[in-house]
Image (tube, grey):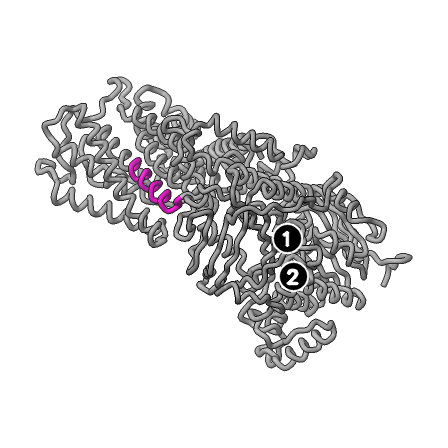
Amino acid sequence: MNQKRAVFLDVAGIVGSAVLAIVCGFVIILLVSDQPFQAISSFLAGPLSNAFHLSTVINKAIPLVFTGLALAVVFQANVFSMGAEGQLYVGGFAGALAALYVTGIPVWLHVPLILLCAIAGGVLFGAIAGVLKARWDANEVVTTLMLNYVAIIMTSYLVNNVFKDPASGGYARMAFFDRDLLLPKLSGTFPVHAGIFLAVAAVILVYVLLYKTKIGYELRLVGKNDKFARYGGILTKRVVVVSVMISGGLAGLAGIVELLGVHGTYKDNFSVGLGFDGIIIALLARNHPIGVLLSALFYAYLQVGGQIMQAESDVSRELAIIIQVLLVLFVSAQAVFGYLKQRAILRQRKPSGEGKVNADVV
Amino acid sequence: MAGVCDTMTVLLQMKDIHKVYPNGTAANRGVDLEVHEGEIHALVGENGAGKSTLMKILFGLEAPTSGTILYKGEPVRFKGPRDAIRHGLGMVHQHFMLVPSLTVSENIVLGDEPRKGWFGLFRDRDKEWKDIAELIRKFGLKLDPHAVVDTLSVGQKQRVEILKVLYRGAKLIILDEPTAVLTPQETDELFHSIKSLVAQGYTIIFITHKLREVMEISDRITVLRAGRTVRTMLTKDTTKEEISRLMVGRDVLLRVEKQERQPGDVVLSLRHVSATDDKGVPALKDVSFDVRGGEVFGIAGVEGNGQTELVEVITGLRKATGGEVRYLNENLVGKSIGEIRSLNIGHIPEDRQTTGACLTSTIEENLVLDIYRLPAYKRGPFLNRKKLKEFARTMMKTYDVRAASEEQLAGSLSGGNLQKVVIAREMAKNPKLLIASQPTRGVDIGAIEFIHREIIKKRDEGTAVLLVSAELSEIMSLSDRIGVLYNGELVAVLDNTDELTEQEIGYYMLGIKKAEKEATAG
């Protein structure tokens, strides 16, 4: 099996799953709705119908790109970190503090500093789980999930008690950031915020990192076969820690970009699961950075479609969630890919050279 | 019985069996197999020819994609091993499936214990012991039914496996590569048992790739190649050369030709090296030897006698608990794996599937494992993919790796081709020391020939070669000197002269003989 072919079958499988999930959604609409065609057309066409809706899709996709990348990186290293949500809060929090409490430096220096602080927050918080795994072989699924609570509750406490804006009234938030620091909108009619450039840059950077650099080669090798990597002299534990740290940095960026681009302040519980959605994005993308960009857009498209459908018809937006869940189920179903591959082989029954014939040998 | 033919009764017929795995691997693509009652039927073929798959299908472990199976003239499709066993089939797996902490008799009856009392509530130990003693006596397999399996030798464990199958009433017994782990003496005993089984009316399917054994024991032979039956023939009508040609599809040179050795300076030198296995049990005890440039030093021994640990200690994959490993002028003990690899030491690991290669990576990614670090293959902070690709292409051409492109996944290569990738990578470093661990295990004959030639070529160029192999014939044909490991100790170091026989080495492997080497180890 050629790698290109394998990739093609993967993509075909994912697109097929997406179509199938949407079709299932339609069946449900037909069953529950009095105006099914209105609902379907709002759902499908709504997000693309005008510049405002389209920019909502993109704005929703931006943080998902970062968290999707964060998880794609660790998953490629075969580390099942679930910690993007917590790292996002810590990173966002660190960035917010830098935005509010560092003063007297020009904006062009201040914004990068904020981003760096957010990255540093995510990196350091991610490193905890990485070191726990590398040093004591602590299962990363458990540690990252638990550390999420630490991060979410700790930041929540701090924003409610220590850093709360006295003028916020009942809301648990910090003071508003200086307007100059916010990520600008592209235009009034197409209000996508400048985080999109950061997101695209991050996609390219992660792609280059994974596929064009030494550390990327090592990271993927450790993920695919750590015994082989160790035999080749790669310090596998160090690679694991590095992967979790890179992932934490990206998750931290997701947090601060969301704050600078959308909220304009640090709000308690601002994420609502962006870090967990990132798991789904990475899964859909088969952990490939370009795929992350596409699946984040698709995921956001489904969400916005659901909202528009709720506004314009009698179907609630939970249907979009059903479609998302179905999509995950279908994509996870490895059997589908196995079946496709088997069919492909059967069709080209004619023996074609060595290599194709590779019986398993126990 | 109905359906008695003129000479032989056909016991089992498998017709046009196809098997395509969900991952796309076509393991069987039209296999026919016909086994007569009371014969020893050898099933031969290179690794990857589909032998194991065919047997899994027969035994109900896998469902065929298409094809029919006739057993005693009736179409059958076993739902699982239990179903197959009930119909009188038995399989002795290559890797033993025994509970080490239980006794021989407990292992044999496991799952089918004789019962007594209400509703069979209690085990009938008296009946069990009587039955097992009777079974052992009947088949003349020397075993103590009350011995704990953990304490048995490999050959004895295999006998337990055979008894397990017989106890369940098997009439057709499949032996999957039964001699792979045996010493020559144990092999002889096994063959003796097999012959006595056949004399009592049992039928044997004997899976192997060792041609000498095929000639020695079988009545008929079915040769598989690339998932298809090539031919079925009577053993007495054929020769080793013909079988190997059918297996590979071309003529093969079975003997290794080599010149007199020209030993140079000592390259690798071990002194009083000790190490423990994964459980912390001592696995290497005070091992000392030298390997010179331009010689092949073979390590013989039954598997699990410290070979794995020895290689791992030298390559840094395992920490030594004592002693010194000198390579040229450096002590390797305490150095990291990466440091050792960068010292021009080539290592062909015993487990190609997991350690030696990454099956889900491309061939290129497998080949560049060392060079990706070198500045010559970098462009600024990035990898120079063009140069890496070029390197991979050159290697594939030089070492005759047959694949569509360097982008192909390593996992789609046959065993022999994959091993060539490993060898290409390790040879490309121009090693001063080459450690080859089971270099031809699971590799087809054509590739074996190639690999042996490459090893001898390196030796002739002055490389010191440490060869570890469970195949005694491989050790004998390649080595200049042979060390035998038994129970973690190097019990003998022998010059490989014409007088040295497999039997002689076998005695050392079994721990029956031990060379007087105390004088040197002071």
Q: Secondary structure at mark 1?
A: helix
The residue at the far left in this view is A166
| Residue A211 at x, y percent in the picture | 42, 31
Residue at the location (29% across, 43% down)? Answer: A126
| Residue B476 at x, y percent in the picture | 66, 53
Quadrant, the N terminus of chain B: bottom right
In the image, which residues are magenta? A235-251
Query: Hey, what amino acid is under mark 2?
Result: Ile
Q: Secondary structure at mark 2?
A: helix
The answer to whether B31 is drawn above or below residue A250 in the figure is: below
- The answer for which chain carries disc 1 is B
Contact? badges 1 and 2 (CB < 8 Å) = yes
| Residue A129 at x, y percent in the picture | 31, 48
Query: Hey, what amino acid is under mark 1?
Result: Ile
| Residue A1 at x, y percent in the picture | 58, 35
Q: For the stretch drawn in magenta, what is the main secondary structure?
A: helix
Instruction: Mark 1 vs mark 2: tell me if same chain.
Output: yes
The residue at the far right in this view is B6
Q: Residues within 10 Å of mark 2 (few under 14, many from 20)?
A: many
| A237 falls in the magenta region | yes
Q: Residues within 10 Å of mark 1 (few under 14, many from 20)?
A: many
Q: Which residue is mark 2?
A: B505
Q: Residue B206 versus residue B33: which sits nearer the camera? A: B206
Residue B348 visible, this orientation: no
Q: Which residue is mark 1?
A: B475
